[in-house]
Image: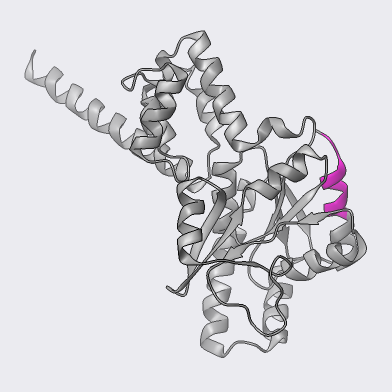
């Protein structure tokens, strides 16, 4: 091969590896749903087509090499197979696997979960509390945590308080839609089981969470509807944060800087609700939760 051609081939190979690495990162973060990646892999010009199925599966939360190999064996797909090279039946089996695991097919016509997220001080907790008080038919996802209960907190109502060993078992079994370690100490997570149970019973369920958690939910449950709660204006968001009086000047500025970044993520969400009046924002949210696709 001529030297010029060899250099061009090397550059193309490096670019392809970088594109696949970026693709896997987007899948892990929740910016790209696994179902969309699978559908896009039919286009041979996209990096999705060259991604190995084993690597694709390992972008799922709590799925490592061992679990991915076990799934491939059950699906009858070679570990060397790439998404773009799947046969029709293999693609159908893989799509069904992804749909079942993510809960997409649990609620025909209605998302199995509605996720409410948004920037700091936008009023996510206030809107969720209003929904809890005025719309009793809506179920609320209760998180698990490894921290001990605080005075007045009830197990199964505010949180499910579990041990580190129980949390590890839930992670190993892929029983959490998302999880995080807070302040480098205690772990929090959203159980998958109650969400699927509510979906099977046709009950709408709401999860109020931060942006990173919402991205994890998108990765592990692509059928969930993500709703971004936005402030009426930047000035109003600053006013609300200052009005809380719970942070000092340095902490307030740090939170505002984070909020600027979080506001830019609104385009990742399925719907945007402006929290001008709490009752109207809650009504808009309820209407979205009860409508069918």
Decide if residue 285 is on the left or right side of residue 88: right
Residue 1: horizontal and vertical position, in percent? 8, 13
Decide if residue 196 is on the left or right side of residue 176: right
Quick check: is 80 in the magenta stretch?
A: no
Relative to 32, residue 135 above or below: below
Look at the magenta stretch and give its main secondary structure: helix
Q: What stretch is highlighted in magenta?
A: 284-292
Residue 225 visible in the current orientation: no
- Compare residues 13 and 182 and report the one nearer the observer: 182
Q: Which residue is drawn at 92% across and 63% down?
A: 134
Task: Give the residue furthest to the right.
Answer: 134
Name the quadrant of the C terminus.
Answer: top right
Residue 183: horizontal and vertical position, in percent? 46, 75
Residue 143 visible in the current orientation: yes
Relative to 238, residue 145 above or below: above
Decide if residue 280 is on the left or right side of residue 35: right
Residue 96: horizontal and vertical position, in percent? 59, 23
Quick check: is 286 in the magenta stretch?
A: yes
Give residue 228's quadrant in the image.
Answer: bottom right
Give residue 5's quadrant in the image.
Answer: top left
- Compare residues 207 and 116 and report the one nearer the observer: 207
Q: Residue at x 53, y 39 (%)?
A: 32
């Amino acid at each position: 091969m001529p030297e010029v051609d060899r250099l061009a081939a090397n550059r193309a190979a490096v670019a392809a590896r970088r594109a696949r690495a970026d693709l896997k990162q987007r899948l892990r973060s929740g910016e790209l749903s696994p179902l969309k990646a699978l559908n896009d892999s039919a286009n041979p010009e996209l990096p999705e087509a060259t991604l190995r199925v084993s690597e694709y599966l390992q972008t799922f939360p709590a799925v490592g090499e061992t679990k991915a190999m076990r799934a491939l064996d059950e699906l009858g797909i070679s570990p060397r197979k790439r998404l773009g090279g799947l046969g029709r039946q293999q693609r159908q089996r893989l799509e069904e696997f992804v749909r079942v695991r993510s809960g997409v097919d649990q609620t025909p016509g209605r998302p199995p979960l509605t996720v409410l997220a948004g920037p700091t001080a936008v009023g996510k907790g206030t809107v969720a509390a209003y929904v809890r008080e005025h719309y009793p038919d809506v179920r609320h996802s209760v998180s698990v945590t490894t921290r001990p209960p605080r005075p007045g907190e009830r197990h199964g109502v505010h949180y499910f308080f579990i041990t580190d060993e129980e949390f590890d078992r839930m992670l190993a079994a892929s029983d959490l839609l998302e999880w995080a370690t807070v302040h480098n100490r205690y772990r929090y997570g959203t159980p998958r089981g109650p969400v699927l149970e509510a979906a099977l019973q046709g009950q709408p369920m709401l999860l109020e969470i931060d942006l990173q958690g919402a991205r994890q939910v998108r990765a592990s449950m692509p059928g969930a509807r993500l709703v971004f709660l936005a402030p009426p204006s930047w000035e109003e968001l600053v006013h609300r944060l200052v009005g809380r009086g719970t942070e000092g000047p340095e902490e307030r500025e740090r939170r505002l800087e984070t909020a600027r970044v979080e506001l830019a993520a609104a385009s990742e969400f399925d719907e945007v609700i402006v929290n001008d009046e709490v009752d109207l924002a809650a009504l808009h949210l309820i209407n979205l939760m009860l409508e069918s696709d």
